[in-house]
Image (cartoon, grey):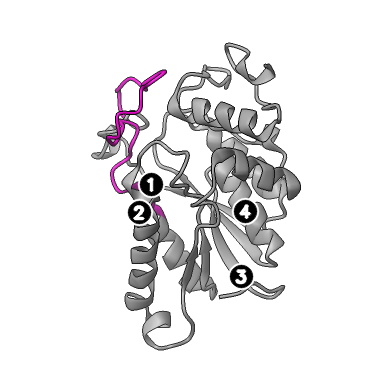
Amino acid sequence: MSGGADRLAVVLLSGGLDSATALAVARERGFACHALSFDYGQRHRFELVAAGRVAEALGAVKHRVVKLDLSAAGGFGRSALTDRIDVPKDRADDGGVPVTYVPARNTIFLAVALGYAEAIGAFDIFIGVNAIDYSGYPDCRPEFIEAFERLANLGTAAGAEGHGRFAVHAPLIGMTKGQIIRTGLALGVDYSLTHSCYDPSADGLACGHCDACRLRLAGFAEAGATDPLAYENGAGKR
């Protein structure tokens, strides 16, 4: 469904580069944006602080942080982002699903976003997934987004009763990381407010070696821009 000044959208906002750009795209399309973040037991909780900064800077109507414990302590785990498993550094892409995959994370997040959207009368959900420059997660693919959109319209009262049709927008899904960054810069995204690293230092410095850092740095190089983040190895200032 097309945007408009009186239209509401729920935007999944992790605090990272992609989700910040997705929020900027939703705002540019004229939506009143309700940003939704998750405290799910992730080791890189600096992203939640970043999400708050981004939501404020990009004019979100509201920013909610939902607590869902997907860590080993909460009975889930099985991911380097939520468990005592080393985050891979300088990993060679072997085409497999990496250990940083959090089981069913985007399915869970989109389900919560769908419930929130139905409750506030929104029919548009934005998510910053990308299927080009990404780590191989199965829940970042176009077919997953299409399947969830079908589910949204089958499994809700609003969809079943014909009050509107839910649309799951993934505006970055076919872009390279460099294209995403150029899009965000054109829309006024301040990437110094974001946080991408999977394994930051105690004071929040990005490691420069995990998948997220390497993809981010390669994207800024492709975009011909300088990453404003501080890295332990000074990578962003090159």
Relative to residue 75, is residue 188 drawn left or right? Answer: right
Of labels 2 and 3, earlier in sequence is 3
Do residues under tags 3 and 4 come within 8 Å of each other at their CB atoms?
Answer: no
Residue under circle 1? 68
- Nearer the observer: mark 3 or 4; the answer is 4
- Residue 87 lies within the magenta run: yes
When the figure is inspected, residue 73 is found, relative to residue 115, above or below; the finding is above
Residue under circle 3? 8
- Nearer the observer: mark 4 or 1; the answer is 4
Residue under circle 4? 23
Magenta segment boundaries in residue numbering:
83-109
What percent of the width, then of the height, locates residue 193? 67, 35
Callout 3: SS: strand
Relative to residue 29, is residue 109 drawn left or right? Answer: left
Residue 48 shows up from this direction: yes
What percent of the width, then of the height, locates residue 33? 63, 61
- Nearer the observer: mark 4 or 2; the answer is 4
Residue under circle 2? 108
- Nearer the observer: mark 2 or 1; the answer is 2
Of labels 2 and 1, earlier in sequence is 1
What percent of the width, then of the height, locates residue 6? 69, 75
In terms of depth relative to the viewer, which is nearer, 230 or 181? 181
Of labels 4 and 2, earlier in sequence is 4
Question: Label 4 amino acid?
Answer: Leu
